[in-house]
Image (spheres, helix red, strand yellow):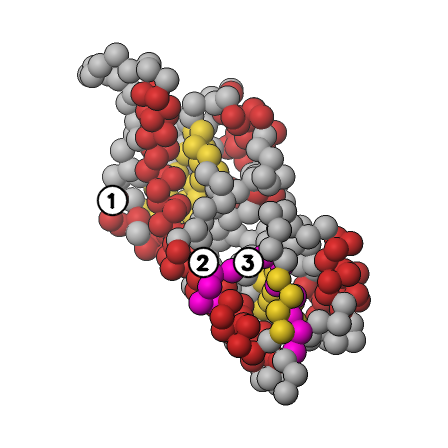
Amino acid sequence: MTKPPVLLTRRIPSAAFARLESGCDVDLHDGPAPLTPDELKRRVAGKQGLICLLTDRIDGSVVDAGLPTLKIVANIAVGYDNIDAPAVKSRGVVVTNTPDVLTEATAELTWALILALARRVAEGDRLIRRGGWTGWALDFMLGTELRGKQLGVIGRGRIGRAVAAKAAAFGMTPVFAKHDMSLDELFVSSDVISIHTPATAETRHLIDRRTLARMKRSALLVNTARGSIVDEDALVWALKERLIAGAALDVFEKEPTVHPGLMTLENVVLSPHLGSATRETRTAMADLAVRNVLEVLAGNPPLTPV
């Protein structure tokens, strides 16, 4: 029996690829750069499934290129702001994502960034590497302790709750925006603010000049959600004006481009979108996307529909 054709926009872990290949005729894009929009439309034609990454923009025109055969778009990410989900679903195509499997990995990375920022770990590493450390001193590179401080969490989804659950280990009190207090109260009272809300039209530049000016001057801002939530121009301004003490970012407005103003500041920790980047988690994400495709192409409901 002929296997259903599926387009895979980037190589995935071998175990997940083997599962996909066992049930589908796979058209793999194995190049170093993402498919261009025109290439994506050309190669999705005639396919029944599309497995994509957050670097692939999937809109109605891409789906139209895959119709009438295309049945599912499976995104290897929990966020799906790269997909125009209403446009895709309005054309009768299923959209899936990969929730749950990356929750703990992203929560762990969030705490790694909080600790690195509070204790100036990345800054100290850079100092040593450029030969700037001259020895121990009582008042040298003092950071801030987390115990007794308030962790303000924006977004009460799986990842936000997982981050909050770990707060007790560091003696912090977690509070959620809109659940424990208003968003404005959270900005004013929190010592560390961690963002875990989806990227939507409503959350774009949620962190702007106004909100940054409301924060404590000792506050630390952490974003492991999506880059569009933070106005990077405003963040650079706030950091240079010392309106907040520091920021740690795993996501950026124009990835992989990083705002040049952030690159020169010592009170900033930057990581290249590593939230889910463990071997275990990335394999589980790819495997879940593959299983969604296999289920839908077999005539069954998707496992994790958007």
Tell me: residue 225, above or below residue 45: above
When asked about the image quadrant of residue 5, the answer is bottom right
Tell me: residue 26, above or below residue 120: below
Answer whether labels 3 and 2 touch (C-beta < 8 Å). Answer: no
Residue underneath mark 3 = 11
Residue 285 relative to residue 64: left or right:
left
Q: Magenta part of the protein: which range?
A: 4-16
In this rendering, which labeled residue sits more in front, label 1 or label 2?
2
The verdict on residue 239 being magenta is no
Q: Tell me what residue is drawn at x 49 percent, y 70 percent.
A: 18
Label 3 vs 2, first from the N-terminus: 3
Q: Amino acid at mark 1?
A: Gly
Residue underneath mark 1 = 171
Label 3 vs 1, first from the N-terminus: 3
The N terminus sits in image quarter: bottom right
Residue 302 percent location from the top left of the image: 57, 77
Q: Tell me what residue is drawn at x 60 percent, y 47 percent.
A: 32
Q: Tell me what residue is drawn at x 65 percent, y 78 percent.
A: 4
Residue 129 relative to residue 232: left or right:
left
Q: Residue 130: which numbered mark, if any?
A: none
User: Which residue is nearer to you in this view: 110 or 125?
Assistant: 125
In this rendering, which labeled residue sits more in front, label 3 or label 2?
3
Q: Let me know if residue 186 appears in the view.
A: no
Secondary structure at badge 1 equals loop
Residue 196 percent location from the top left of the image: 48, 50
Q: CA distance from mark 3 to mark 2?
A: 12 Å
Q: Amino acid at mark 3?
A: Arg
Residue underneath mark 2 = 282
Residue 8 percent location from the top left of the image: 61, 63
Tell me: residue 236, above or below residue 202: above
